[in-house]
Image (cartoon, rainbow, N blue to C red):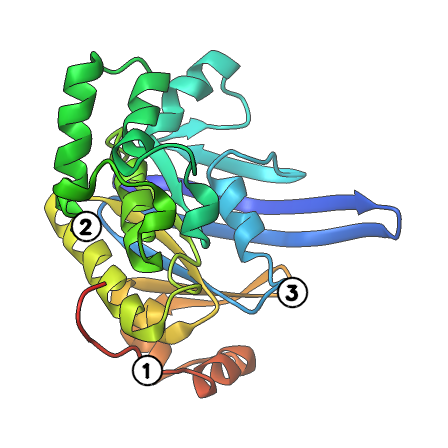
Amino acid sequence: MPDELVRAESVTKVFRTRAGEVRAVDDVSLTVHRGETLGLVGESGSGKSTMARLMMGLQTPTSGRVSFDGRDLGTLPARELRMLRPRMQMVFQNPYGSLLPHFSAIGNVMEPLRLHERGDKESRRTKALELLELVGINTGHAELYPRQFSGGQQQRIAIARALALEPELLVCDEPTSSLDVSIQAQILELFTDLRNRLGLSFLFISHNLAVVERLADRVAVMNKGRLVEENTTESLFHSPQDDYTRQLLSAVLPIRQDSAP
């Protein structure tokens, strides 16, 4: 389909350990379309984070194929893969751990632009300030360091950094799970706003279906490395087909809307 941005076809990933082979992902096919959010859910160890790294081309599948904008990531020359990287970026679970602690907020956002030789120092600074403002960080605090911000603010800075190279796909790996429930709602609202403003596609990974329900157009459920169910968000929540999905739904906690972090 022409609106497919990233597609995984019959992907398997096997890790070899001293204890033997571990099949982290087992024959999974997934597609993220342009402008949509696909939620990928499952408990810890279900294979969802490994699947995300495969779809980003950060790991090579043992078998199967991953393509981005119709180009097979497994066969792309290294130089072409590097040129493709800015079009897909990640937001991680622990914002403080993902930020450079000795760089200011604006320095963290400017760094991808410097590494990819985008513009001069002045233009990089201007763009970084625009991005900090976009994600709700007071630009008067741009010179502060990550440790001087709250967890929610740190995640906003990490999101601004992920946006610096103008990606088409944001892969978000449990980006709200380390935050207070009241702060989670604000970050989810930010993701929704960014999708509407920038036309981004999201692969949003979480163990919490309540988080995914607020954001995703479609939901894929993984269990023990396998894809057990995939459907529109509305259909999956109202009529789950798999017992494992029903178990996850029974543990759903609400996400409430409170004041911004």
Q: Disc 3 designates what residue?
A: 224
Q: Which mark is residue 174?
A: none
Residue 238 point in image, percent of width and height: 32, 84
Question: Can you say which quadrant of the picture contains the C terminus?
Answer: bottom left
Q: Nearer the viewer, mark 1 or mark 3?
A: 1
Judging from the image, what secondary structure is the residue with disc 3 in? Answer: loop
Label 2: which residue?
Answer: 195
3D distance between C-alphas at marks 1 and 2: 22 Å
In the picture, residue 101 is in which quadrant?
Answer: top left
Residue 122 falls left or right of residue 100? left
Label 1: element kind: loop
Could you say which is closer to the camera, residue 53 or residue 147?
147
Q: Which residue lies at the image location 49% right of the left edge and 79% below the top edge?
A: 248
Residue 60 x %, y %: 61, 34
Q: CA distance from mark 1 to mark 3?
A: 26 Å
Q: Image point 67% across, 38% down: which residue?
A: 62
Q: Earlier in the sequence, mark 1 or mark 3?
A: 3
Nearer the observer, 68 or 176: 176
**Residue positioned 35% across, 58% down in the render:** 151
User: Which of disc 2 and disc 1 is earlier in sequence?
Assistant: 2
Residue flagged by tag 1: what amino acid is it? Answer: Pro
Relative height, residue 139 to residue 192 (above, below):
above
Look at the numbered discs 2 and 3 and tell me whether their residues touch, using CB distance below 8 Å.
no
Picture coordinates of residue 171, whole percent (x, y)? 39, 46
Q: Horizontal and vertical percent for residue 29? A: 50, 51
Residue annotated with mark 1 = 254
Specify the amino acid type for callout 2: Arg
Quarter of image, res 71: top left
User: On screen, 181 above or below 125?
Assistant: below
SS category of the residue bearing label 2: helix
